[in-house]
Structure formats: C-alpha cells, structure tokens
Amino acid sequence: MKNLLLTLSATTALASPLLAQDLEKDELTFGFIKLTDMAPLAVAYENGYFLDEGLFVTLEAQANWKVLLDGVIGGQLDGAHMLAGQPLAATIGYGTEAHIITPFSMDLNGNGITVSNAVWEEMKPNIPTNADGLPQHPISASALKPVVEKYKSEGKPFNMGMVFPVSTHNYELRYWLAAGGLEPGYYSPENVTGQIGADVLLSVTPPPQMPATLEAGTIYGYCVGEPWNQAAVFKGIGVPVITDYELWKNNPEKVFGITAEFAEEYPNTTKAVVKALIRAAMWLDENDNANRMEAVEMLSQPEYVGADAEVIANSMTGTFEYEKGDKREVPDFNVFFRYNATYPYYSDAVWYLTQMRRWGQIPEAKSDSWYDEVAKSVYKPEIYLEAARALVDEGLADEADFPWDSDGYKAATPAEDVIDGIAYDGRQPNAYLESLPIGLKGEQKVVGTEIEG
C-alpha cells in the first residue's frame, strides 16, 4: 500500500504546476553514513518530498566516509550526507582532489565525546559536582589532563577515536582537548597521522564501530555523532562527558555535498533536491520537535541507522543521557531547521578551514581573503535561497524563515557560547587563529616534529 501511495504521489507531483521546469535528471542515488543526522534524507524519502519534486531517489548506506566521498567524486553517488570538512578539503586538494559544493547544511550540533568507564572513574575526582551530587556540566578536558599524564608516566599512549581526518569530530575533539591544556597533535605534509607532538593520540574509527572499539580497549574515548554516544551508555561501557552543544552552542555539523559539475549540468534537479531537503528539515523541527518520535521510528529501520529506537530517542527527542540515569534536558541537541540551520553560511566553512590550518592540514599561512574565496567556492547559499524562494511561492514555507538579506556570514559567536571563552568571527580568520592558545598561527609551520616560526 505504501509503495502504491508513493507512486500516486509521484504521478500527482509530475502533473502539478510545482514542476513547471524540466528536471535534467530524475533518478538519483544518494549516500549516507548510519548517523541520526542523516535524518533529512530519510524524511524527504519517507514523507514523499523527493517524489513531490518528481525525483526518484535511492538512499544507500556507505561503509565509511572515504568510500562515500569517492562515490560522489566517481559518479556512483549523485550526492551525499557529508562531513562539512569533506567538500572543503577536496576542493583545496587535501587528500582526494575534486570540486565539491554544498547548497544545503544538514544540521547543527549532534555530537558528543565519550570516555571509557575506567577513564571516567579517574576523571571524576577532578570534576566539581552540583548540589544533587551529579557532575557539573560542561566538563572541561582539564579534568582529563591528570589522567593522560598518569598514562604517559606509565608509558601507555592515550588513544582516542574520531571518524575522519577532516571531520567535525576530529576538530571538536581537538578543540576540547586544547581548551583543557592538552596537545592533540599536528599534521605536516610528510606526516598525516596528526599525532606530531601529541599528548593524546587520535585515530580514525568508523562511527558504528566506536562502541565496540572502546569496549575492546583499543581506544579510551571518542568523539562521534549519535546514536553512538548513547549506545555506550546503554551498553554500560562508557560515559559521554560533553556534547558539542556545550562545546560550541549551535555549531555547524554535516552538509549535503554534490560535485560542482553536477550542479552545473543539472541546475533544476539540484534545486528540486534542496527543496525536498528543506521541507524535511522543517518537518523535523516543526511544532517544537513534535515529529521527532516518528523520525526516530524511521531512523531505527535497518536501512537507515539501524539502532534501537530507544537509543536514538535518547538524544533525538530533546534529552541527553550522560551516566546511566543522568538524563538532562538538551532541547537543541539536534537542530535541523531553526536558527537557519539549513543555510550554508560562509562563516561555517571558514571555521573548518581555520581548524585545518590550526592543526597543520593547511601547512602554510593564508590570507583572510583566501578563506573567503574558498568558502564561496564550496558553500552555495544562492542555490539554497533559490530553492527556498520556490517553496515560499508554492505556499510550502514561510518567507520569515529564511535569511534573504544575509551576506553569508553569521554574526560573531560570542565568547560565552564556546567552552574556552574565545569568540569566533568568520570575517577575521587569522585574528581568530591568533586568539587560540594552542595551534599554529601566523607564519608558523610544522617541520619534522617541531613548530617553527
């Protein structure tokens, strides 16, 4: 019956005035990783928004972020749920070189940092408590520092996992460690481990494998998206110590990525895809997240995230559980539409580029204008606003919900919204880098195992 209804929906859409333009390509395959923030793709499919645009979409889970990126570059995938750093890194030639763009930002927040039970017990004496005896949040990495120093004195490397070298998770974990006085390590053109001079050794683990890798003792903690932090709580093997909402309030997360060639060759199709994704994001956040449990049921299906609905709901419905039983209200843990979450801001792109420079993935100093130019070559708010305008004209979205007059840069993030109390202004990337106590700045570069300059 569901397939029949979807077919009827497609027939109605194709005959409606909403599709006055011709689609250059109507059969599409999109990739994703099994994380809750792929939700806009699942919702656009399940609610028939792709079909409303005359698009026949197949969604395919990918083994890891590299396979996903290679699929988009090679044309096996028409687009994908991507790490925000992937289009930027590919476009500047860090790793695989290709011009990838994003006309749509998938979400804000959604990640956490989890440590093993043993590490948590060692951290707890360093963490102040509330009147109820529960730990005060946010928890600084300064509470982890004595633990790392103890491991080092015993000759044991302190290993932690992140999902990809240009992932939000890598940069958020590094940000948290550095804010607590720990060196997360540097990259150089000759050494891409990211472990030069590191107190904490970070390495790649695919998201769904994080809990098992932690349980095996290969890593002592990790940074990942949901549901893989809450999975550690449910399994009783780890404790999430901080969410990225606490690290940087309403930080940008995943993006939807396509090749620049795809957007040029199929502009009408690209706009139609963005329209469907905007509608999905609106549905996910509307009426104070009233649809989230329905979304949880969608995501729990094996073809999407495939985790238990109870685990996904633990964060997706406005709460987050730290230690077992310590569940707290975090209504903005997952944001898909409000706060202009879907608009691809240049300032978001610039932040990722500053982190690449901070840790040596961009080995040489760059001018402020370079950051601006790269951001504008990858993030495409003009495509987004064209899609949004069509939705407003069709009566499917409200005019007031979109930043029509934006120059692509958000107002500076105030110091109180970031764990280290350092403000971020995307218009001044080099001044921002100078303000960070740990990390490359100015003309500094990594030579061998040393920072020079």
Image: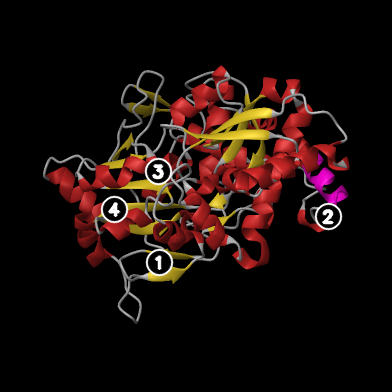
The answer to whether residue 444 is seen in the rendering is no
The answer to whether residue 336 is seen in the rendering is yes
For the residues labelled 3 and 4, the Cα–Cα distance comes to 15 Å
Closer to viewer: mark 2 or mark 4: 2
At x 41%, y 63%, the residue is 138
Q: In this rendering, is residue 171 above or below 280?
A: above
Q: Main secondary structure of the magenta part?
A: helix
Element under disc 3: helix
Element under disc 1: loop
Amino acid carrying mark 2 in the image: Glu
Residue bearing mark 1: 137
Which residues are the magenta region? 385-395
Residue bearing mark 2: 399
Query: Which is nearer the N-term, disc 2 or disc 4?
Result: 4
Amino acid carrying mark 3 in the image: Arg
Q: How is the image coloured?
A: secondary structure
Would residue 389 be counted in the magenta stretch? yes
Q: In this rendering, is residue 125 above or below 259?
A: below
* Residue projecting furthest to the left: 154
